[in-house]
Amino acid sequence: MSKEWDVLVASANFEHRRSLIRILEELPLNVISVSTFQQAEEVLSRQHIALMFSDQRLPDGTYRELLSHTQSCGQAPRVVLTTEEYDVVDPQEVAKCGVLGAVKYPFQATDVELQVIRAAHEDRLELEPAIAQ
């Protein structure tokens, strides 16, 4: 994986954002960090983001609204939800929305890395049929 893969971290919680960035910066990724829905929307409209880690709720929107925005633009990144330790995540609900997975705070490097690997694998699977044609 090269540094050309852009990853967006959208979290209003400074400690969560910092923790996730520390883990991601150990990987060969370009990490972009924002704290609001509006900032995330601006980044997503300016450049292609391969993977986005997003809180379920941002101060001015939700991950679902971000997904709707990116899908309407035709450049939907893979999305991983970031949650509090006590937050309940309904796997069926997030699967319907197209969410790749979820990681709970405090974030463990292996959990975050697994989501990056899953996103890269799914990206590769999407590219293979296009290459075969």
Image (cartoon, helix red, strand yellow):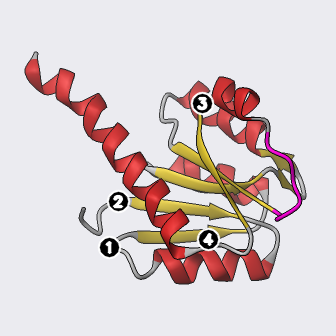
Q: Residue at x 60, y 45 (%)?
A: 101
Q: Does the magenta stretch include residue 11?
A: no
Disc nearest the viewer among 1 and 4: 1
Q: Earlier in the sequence, mark 2 or mark 1?
A: 2
| 27 left or right, relative to 40 | left
- Label 4 and label 3: CA atoms lie apart by 22 Å
Q: Earlier in the sequence, mark 1 or mark 3?
A: 1
Disc nearest the viewer among 4 and 3: 3
- Label 1 and label 3: CA atoms lie apart by 25 Å
Residue 56 in the image: state x and y as whole percent: 80, 50
SS under mark 1: loop
- Label 1 and label 4: CA atoms lie apart by 16 Å
Residue on which disc 4 sits = 33
Residue on which disc 3 sits = 98
Residue 18 in the image: state x and y as whole percent: 66, 82
Magenta part of the chain: 84-89
Residue on which disc 2 sits = 5
| 73 left or right, relative to 38 | left
Q: Looking at the picture, which amino acid does disc 1 mark?
A: Pro
Residue 83 in the image: above or below residue 97: below
Residue 39 in the image: state x and y as whole percent: 71, 60
Asked if disc 2 and disc 1 are in contact, CB closer than 8 Å, the reply is yes
Res. 28 visible in picture:
yes
Callout 4: few (<14), some (14-19), or many (20+) C-alpha neighbours within 10 Å? some
Instruction: Compare residues 121 and 36 and report the one nearer the observer.
Output: 121
Q: Earlier in the sequence, mark 3 or mark 2?
A: 2
Q: Looking at the picture, which amino acid does disc 4 mark?
A: Ser
Residue 35 in the image: above or below residue 132: below
Quarter holding residue 53:
bottom right
